Image: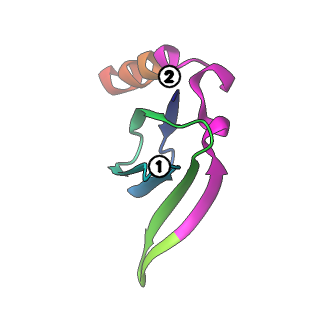
Amino acid sequence: MVECIYQNDTSRMVIMKCIGSNQFYLEKVIMPSEIYLFNAPKEARLEIWRMSMSGQMLHVRADVSDHKTSSRDSNAEELINNRLTEIAS
């Protein structure tokens, strides 16, 4: 399992689906500007679904490794602190 992060930088809620081997499945509604930390198998796939007028629409399909906290330009703690600063302002 690897620690991952996803930040919804859109103005709409999205649905994140993470699908891995051995029946691993994670689904989470993520609100605008929300940062979500999660653990997933390293070979899992991530799908981001946006809501549209006609229902859900697949927006992004990626490998979980693209969202590992260690592979991000900024680490998870820094992202969260920046978001808390924005909220406090």
Q: Residue at x 52, y 49 (%)?
A: 21
> Can the viewer see residue 8?
yes
Residue, disc 2: 79
In the picture, the disc for residue 22 is 1
| Amino acid of disc 2 | Leu
Q: Residue at x 65, y 36 (%)?
A: 65
Where in the figure is residue 57, as x and y percent of width and height? 51, 73
Q: Residue at x 37, y 48 (%)?
A: 30
Q: Earlier in the sequence, mark 2 or mark 1?
A: 1
Please determine whether, in this image, residue 43 is positioned above or below residue 84: below
Give the farthest residue toward the front: 22
Element carrying mark 2: helix
Q: Identify which residue, 1 or 47, lies in the foreground.
A: 1
Magenta residues (range): 58-78
Please determine whether, in this image, residue 57 is positioned above or below residue 16: below
Where in the figure is residue 62, as x and y percent of width and height? 65, 51
Please determine whether, in this image, residue 70 is positioned above or below residue 63: above
